[in-house]
Image: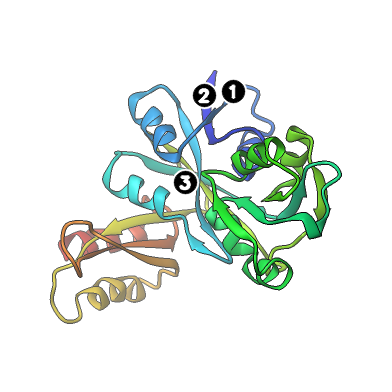
């Protein structure tokens, strides 16, 4: 059986993404983990075969924890991706009303996706952050009537909460992209994407010279992000996604040139 991890507890969007990934695969068993770091390290140690980890959201951008760990702490590859629509909801204990709310529990990404809503409806509420939306829902279920949480409908069902308001995210197209991390990547399918991470010399035009290589080979870049190298101030590493598989001839040639730079 293939062991697949997701960021728990039950009721998270990560669980939804993991279930979508293993749909139709009878040889998979899902395991929930408390942190992204624990989950990715479990793959590194061979305790999991794959891990479904969030990497970017269409409203809030990159999930830095996943990017930093993948770049610097583990030696894993990305073998697939899963993109799901994210609908955030305001959940409360049964009987609680909007005028009772003084605290809003959520994950930082989820709260950020509902920034306008919170500002308009609950400008005086204190935002309390948790490691996952499901953890926030569990805390709201155990808290008083003055606490609400931002989470999924699935979390409301798991923790016995009422849905006070539905679809409260700021944008209609709220999508989260998850990557499937493993010790090996996938074979070519003809509809592939390659993710690379690199640093450059501290010289004028260094990044441009790298990106120009993809232009010369007519390779489309679908994403570029930068993160501090955590070695010294002003030094960055770059994450780039390009269309194509690393075994495609044009991608292979371009990556050979990138390594030379």
Evaluate if marks 2 and 1 touch, with contact meaning CB atoms under 8 Å apart: yes
Q: Residue at x 25, y 74 (%)?
A: 207
Q: Which one is in front in this view, the residue at disc 3 or the one at disc 2?
A: 2
Question: Which image quarter holds the C terminus?
Answer: bottom left
Please tell me which of labels 3 and 1 falls first in the chain. 1
Q: From the viewer's perspective, is 94 left or right of 142?
A: right
Q: Residue at x 42, y 61 (%)?
A: 241
Q: Which one is in front in this view, the residue at disc 3 or the one at disc 1?
A: 1
Whole-angstrom CA distance, mark 2 to mark 1, is 5 Å
Give SS at disc 2. Answer: strand
- Is residue 35 visible from the viewing direction of this image? yes
The quarter of the picture where residue 159 lies is top right
Q: Which residue does the numbered mark 3 point to in the structure image? A: 188
Looking at the picture, tell me which residue is in the foreground, 209 or 131.
Answer: 131
Q: Residues within 10 Å of mark 3 (few under 14, many from 20)?
A: few
The quarter of the picture where residue 38 lies is top left
| Residue 60 to residue 31: above or below | below
User: Farthest bottom residue?
Assistant: 204
Whole-angstrom CA distance, mark 3 to mark 2, is 23 Å
Looking at the picture, tell me which residue is in the foreground, 198 or 31.
Answer: 31
Residue 164 coordinates in the image, percent (x, y): 82, 53
Residue 29 badge: 1
Q: Residues within 10 Å of mark 1 (few under 14, many from 20)?
A: some
Give SS at disc 1. Answer: strand
Q: Residues within 10 Å of mark 2 (few under 14, many from 20)?
A: some
The quarter of the picture where residue 25 lies is top right
Give SS at disc 3. Answer: loop
Whole-angstrom CA distance, mark 3 to mark 1, is 25 Å
Q: From the viewer's perspective, is 147 left or right of 8?
A: right
Residue 3 badge: 2
Residue 82 coordinates in the image, percent (x, y): 58, 48
Residue 99 coordinates in the image, percent (x, y): 80, 60
């Amino acid at each position: 059986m293939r062991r697949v991890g997701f960021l728990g507890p039950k009721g998270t969007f990560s669980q939804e993404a993991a279930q979508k990934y293993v749909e139709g695969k009878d040889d998979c068993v899902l395991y929930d983990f408390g942190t992204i770091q624990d989950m990715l390290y479990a793959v590194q140690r061979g305790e999991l075969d794959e891990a479904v980890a969030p990497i970017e959201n269409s409203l809030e951008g990159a999930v830095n924890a996943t990017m930093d760990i993948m770049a610097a702490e583990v030696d894993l590859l990305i073998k697939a991706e899963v993109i799901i629509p994210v609908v955030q909801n305001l959940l409360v204990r049964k009987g609680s009303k909007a005028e009772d709310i003084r605290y809003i529990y959520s994950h930082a990404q989820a709260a950020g996706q509902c920034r306008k809503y919170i500002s308009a409806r609950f400008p005086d509420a204190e935002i309390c952050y948790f490691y996952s939306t499901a953890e926030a829902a569990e805390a709201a279920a155990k808290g008083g009537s003055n606490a609400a949480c931002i989470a999924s409908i699935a979390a409301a069902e798991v923790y016995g909460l009422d849905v006070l308001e539905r679809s409260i995210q700021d944008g209609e197209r709220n999508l989260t992209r998850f990557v499937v991390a493993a010790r090996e990547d996938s074979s070519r399918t003809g509809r592939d994407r390659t993710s690379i991470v690199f640093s450059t010399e501290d010289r004028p035009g260094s990044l441009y010279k790298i990106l120009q290589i993809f232009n010369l080979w007519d390779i489309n870049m679908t994403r570029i992000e930068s993160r501090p190298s955590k070695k010294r101030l002003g030094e960055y590493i770059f994450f780039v996604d390009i269309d194509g598989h690393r075994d495609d001839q044009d991608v292979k040639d371009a990556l050979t040139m990138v390594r030379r730079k």
